[in-house]
Image (cartoon, grey):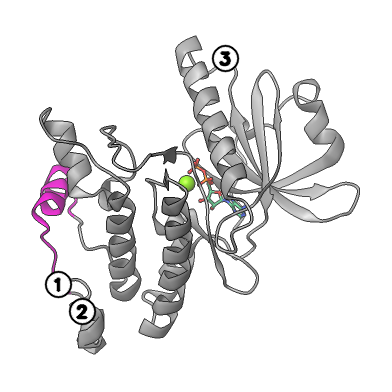
């Protein structure tokens, strides 16, 4: 998918990012996030294609405090990416560059894009295909957890597909280290995928906090969404959606469920 290029998408200035540009030739935009633009890029020496996530950290757009926050968060993301590189179902960070105003993360190019777009195109997936995707996803998540890393933003937008339709987990922007027994309290992630304990501890100071189990909750939400073609917790008023999550309130109401096996439905009960 190629996105339109607006005035705010001008390529970062040559001088600041010289090293990156000497090695890579940036091409079309293939994705974007809150503070990043992702482009296809070509390695000049070999002609091989990669994806580059470009994050702006210049004082023009952000306050000094926000700037340091983005820099720190990106350094954490890079550190974790280096630690997990090499797993067959996790994105590989190939290269990284930091200039005064931009950070560049070069990854394997996942040519078939997001699992989210694939699902939208197919409406819902078969149990067989879902099984294969979930197996790979759970292997990747288990690998993270064994290494004391929690992802915190598992969703079909952050699961990418390669040429052979194999998945790789990406976007470690909210990931962090978590020692056994240690708890987190920070409210972060994507609303529809948040585990009840994340919401509860943000509202109750006496709540003990949450652990890596929150990734497994998100995997459950993904499993449901792949099979049903729509998410388990959704309401156009977000506050009501959050209440549904906290009450664990969902239904097998979409017509897709009529043809599903009892074995798979049983997974949710
Ligand atoms: P953010 O943290 O801003 O959400 P992501 O790392 O999730 O950034 O990247 C944003 C989007 O860019 C992804 O959802 C995906 O569509 C695209 N993208 C990211 N990395 C790659 C990649 N390696 N190959 C292909 N597309 C990618
Ligand atoms: Mg993302």
Which element carries disc 1, helix, strand or loop? Answer: loop
Q: Kindly report which numbered mark, 3 or 2, lies closer to the viewer in this rendering.
A: 2
Asked if the residue at tag 1 contacts the one at tag 2, i.e. Cβ–Cβ closer than 8 Å, the answer is: yes
The residue lying furthest to the top in this view is 64
Spot occupied by residue 40 in the image (x, y as percentages of width and height): 70, 50
Q: Which of 81 and 113 is in front in this view?
A: 81
Whether disc 2's CB lies below 8 Å from ligand 1 is answered: no
Circle 1 packing at 10 Å, graded few (<14), some (14-19), many (20+), is few
Q: Residue at x 56, y 57 (%)?
A: 90
268 horizontally vs 83: left or right: left
Q: Is residue 209 magenta?
A: no
75 horizontally vs 207: left or right: right
The residue that disc 3 covers is: 60
State whether residue 231 is above or below residue 47: below
Spot occupied by residue 75 in the image (x, y as percentages of width and height): 57, 30
The residue that disc 2 covers is: 265
The residue that disc 1 covers is: 269
């Amino acid at each position: 998918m190629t996105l339109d290029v607006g005035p705010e998408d001008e390529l970062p200035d040559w001088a600041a990012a010289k090293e990156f540009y000497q090695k890579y030739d940036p091409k079309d935009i293939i994705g974007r996030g809150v503070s990043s633009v992702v482009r296809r890029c070509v390695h000049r020496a070999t002609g091989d294609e990669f994806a580059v996530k470009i994050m702006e950290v210049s004082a023009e757009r952000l306050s000094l405090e926000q700037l340091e926050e983005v820099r720190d968060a990106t350094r954490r993301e890079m550190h974790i990416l280096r630690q997990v590189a090499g797993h067959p179902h996790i994105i590989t960070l190939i290269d990284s560059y930091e200039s005064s105003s931009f950070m560049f993360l070069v990854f394997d190019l996942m040519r078939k894009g997001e699992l989210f777009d694939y699902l939208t195109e197919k409406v819902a997936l078969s149990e067989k295909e879902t099984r294969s995707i979930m197996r790979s996803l759970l292997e990747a998540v288990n690998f993270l957890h064994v290494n004391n890393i929690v992802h915190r933003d598992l969703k079909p937008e952050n699961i990418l597909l390669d040429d052979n339709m194999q998945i790789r987990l990406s976007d470690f922007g909210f990931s962090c280290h978590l020692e056994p027994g240690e708890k987190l309290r920070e409210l972060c992630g994507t609303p529809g995928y948040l585990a009840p304990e994340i919401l509860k501890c943000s509202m109750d100071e006496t709540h003990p906090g949450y652990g890596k189990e929150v990734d497994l909750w998100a995997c459950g939400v993904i499993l449901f969404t792949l099979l049903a073609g729509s998410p388990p917790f959704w309401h156009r008023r977000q506050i009501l959606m959050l209440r549904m999550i906290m009450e664990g309130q969902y239904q097998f109401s979409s017509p897709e469920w009529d043809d599903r096996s009892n074995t798979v439905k049983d997974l949710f009960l």
